[in-house]
Image: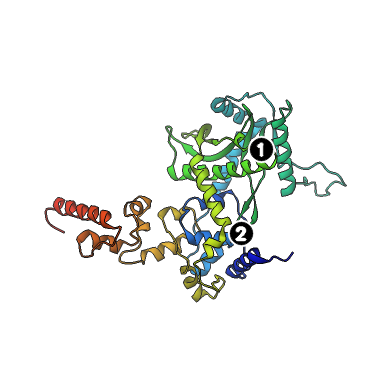
Amino acid sequence: MRTTGTTGAIAGRLEQLRGELPTRNHNARTVAALAANPGCARRGVLDAAGIEKTVLAERLGFPARYGRSPFAIGRGNVFEARVKADDGRELRRLLAEVLGADPDDGALVDVDGPTVPTGPADPTGRPDRPGREERVARTREALLRAASGDPDACAILDHPLLPLDVAGRRAYLEPDAMACRVAGRLHVVEIKSFAIIDGSADPGKLASATRQAAVYVHALRGLAQELGLDPESVSTDIVLVCAQDFANRPIAVVLDVRRELATTRRRLARLSGVEELFAELPEGLTFDVAEERVGAAVARVPAAYLPDCLSACELALFCRDEARGCGTGGGVGTLGTSVRGALGGIDDIGTALALADGTRAPEPGQEDVARLLRRAQALRHEALGGVG
């Protein structure tokens, strides 16, 4: 099918940016990572083009360290299997504790279960696994049955598959589970193997889990609307199942992901409006160039590096090196979101230092920040007894 007009122009621009670089299929982790730094135009352009950033990072000479280790993946799989074992007995107990669900109500339906054979048996003895579209169809059917009030409908949907449009490309998202019959509402269940110790969890891991769960909520609401169901029936309260203390015993908490959901919507809407992302890019720009030129091509798209990017983006090492070389001492983003926010529009550390010691006059709009910086400098000078 031939595209014309604006759509055809955008498709051609995306192809030009990619060149022969491999494309990536988005999943919940990659979509959630979009919300980790929504102000980064570079990430927006690369993700809109569907570029595999791991390959691009290698070409830049900054191989990505971002990703999950095989050990962590294996540990997570073992923990998830334990939570769902015996027809989800442990998961049912947890849902009863935090949502008030009836632990004996309904079945646990595995969307990824083998299909019913319709032809000769596979001589290898391997089960016939369903394809993605079949899993989406099973998810749709289970949701409709649960909404109809069928007493035999599933109470827990295991590994449902949700379609989601990401910048014109179809992505398939797989929540760990879904509670389907709790006061007429649907709840996303996210199972992670990291520990909650004395009621607290690692902030970075917790933030990543809530962003990922928000992506599932967004996709599930879209599917509910498509099925003629009320999108509000998909709760913004998700159930996070983790290990308790050091015993590896599952524990569940309910988290409100409304803030993360709003950020996800904005970021996906921005990717869909790729015309705005391309408006200031030079004509003919492509990232599929020789190794010695690819860095200059990527640098043409502004980035908003933050330390958190190291755990969320494959290009983080390149952007960090670039930010450290920005101005005198580097970009303020290298110091974290709180510092960047406090410096309000000042992009590099050299400018901030010059405003602090009075060697540079503030530009319009920088007066308040400059006054605070000079005050902080004076307090530091006083604390050091006039030295430094």
Q: Quadrant of the C terminus?
A: bottom left
The label on residue 158 is 1
Location of residue 190 (image quadrant): top right
Location of residue 229 (image quadrant): top right
Q: Nearer the viewer, mark 1 or mark 2?
A: 2
Give percent across and percent down for residue 278: 53, 65
Give percent across and percent down for residue 165: 63, 52
Quick check: 42 above or below 206?
below
The label on residue 24 is 2
Whether residue 45 is visible here, answered yes or no, is: no
The label on residue 46 is none
Nearer to the camera, 320 or 11: 11
Mark 1 neighbour density, 10 Å: few (under 14) some (14–19) many (20 or more): many
Whether residue 328 is visible here, answered yes or no, is: yes
Give percent across and percent down for residue 131: 74, 49
Q: Quadrant of the N terminus?
A: bottom right
Location of residue 161 (image quadrant): top right
- Asked which colour scheme the image uses, the reply is rainbow
User: Dot 1 lies on which element?
Assistant: strand
The amino acid type found where label 2 is placed reads Arg
Nearer to the camera, 283 or 327: 283
- The answer to whether the residue labelled 1 contacts the one labelled 2, judged by CB atoms less than 8 Å apart, is no
Q: Report the side of 111 relative to 44 (left or right).
A: right
Quick check: 295 above or below 337?
below
How many dots with numbers? 2
The amino acid type found where label 1 is placed reads Asp
Nearer to the camera, 283 or 70: 283
Rounded to the nearest angstrom, the CA distance separating label 1 from label 2 is 25 Å
Which tag, 1 or 2, sits closer to the chain's start?
Answer: 2
